[in-house]
Amino acid sequence: MKKYASTLINIFCSTRFVCVFCLLASFQLSACAPMVLGGVALAGKAVIDRRTAGIQIEDEAIELRSASGLRNILSKNTNVRVHSYNRMVLLTGEVGNESEKALVERFVKSQDNVKSVVNDLSIGPVSSLTQRAKDSVINGQIRSLLIQAKDVHSSAVYIVVERGIVYLMGRLTEQEAKRVTDLVSTSQVSGLEKVVRVFELLSEEDLRRLSAPAKR
């Protein structure tokens, strides 16, 4: 029995050592190596989400609750995507008719913490897997484009692509929003149909307040 207990203790200690070692190794890597996003290394470029941690959790909850509820009230031949950023919701995808489009909007607006809804659902057949794959490629190319732009805070921009339409979300000043929109609109990304702004505009004072270090 003592031998068995000793073996268990050794296993526990070895496992704990491995976990601590991995944690330290990951810390060393994160401290020394540049961050890689979208295939582009970011050395010293701040990656900042302009939402609080609490709002980010609320956004995820809005998306999950909405998606779950819509599955129960819509027909199978629909493809509705719910995107929430700072409690501003964008609806994209396809539904069968105007009645379903209105139903989706009413349902999402009824969810807790939703501030506003932009309904850009299309009426028609569900997009093909090929189209969705193309949309994913476009999304990646736009993300890389923003990351490479030295005067753009790419982490403050949330990108949605549906049927070649690029929706730009995030909390930006008017100057930042114009720069991002112009950059994407004039890009040579294949398959890009148009660019739609869904930004929450900030004043320069708002931006300074968000950028100020937290007081301890």
Image (spheres, rainbow, N blue to C red):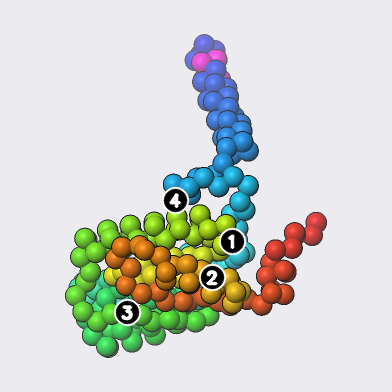
Side of 101 relative to 25 (left or right)? left
Label number found at residue 84: none
Residue 119 position (above or below residue 177): below
Callout 4: SS: loop
Residue contact at pointers 1 and 4, CB within 8 angstroms: no
Circle 4 packing at 10 Å, graded few (<14), some (14-19), many (20+), is few
Circle 1 packing at 10 Å, graded few (<14), some (14-19), many (20+), is few
Which quadrant would residue 210 be assigned to in this image?
Answer: bottom right
From the image, tell me which residue sits under label 2.
179
Of circles 3 and 2, the one toward us is 2
Label number found at residue 121: 3
Of circles 4 and 3, the one toward us is 4
Callout 3: SS: loop
State the separation of the CA atoms marked 1 and 2: 9 Å
Q: Is residue 196 visible?
A: yes
**Picture residue at 32% right of the left edge, 72% below the top:** 193
Q: Nearer the viewer, residue 128 or 115?
A: 128
Q: As shown in the figure, which amino acid type bears the numbered disc 3?
A: Leu
Q: As shown in the figure, which amino acid type bears the numbered disc 2?
A: Arg
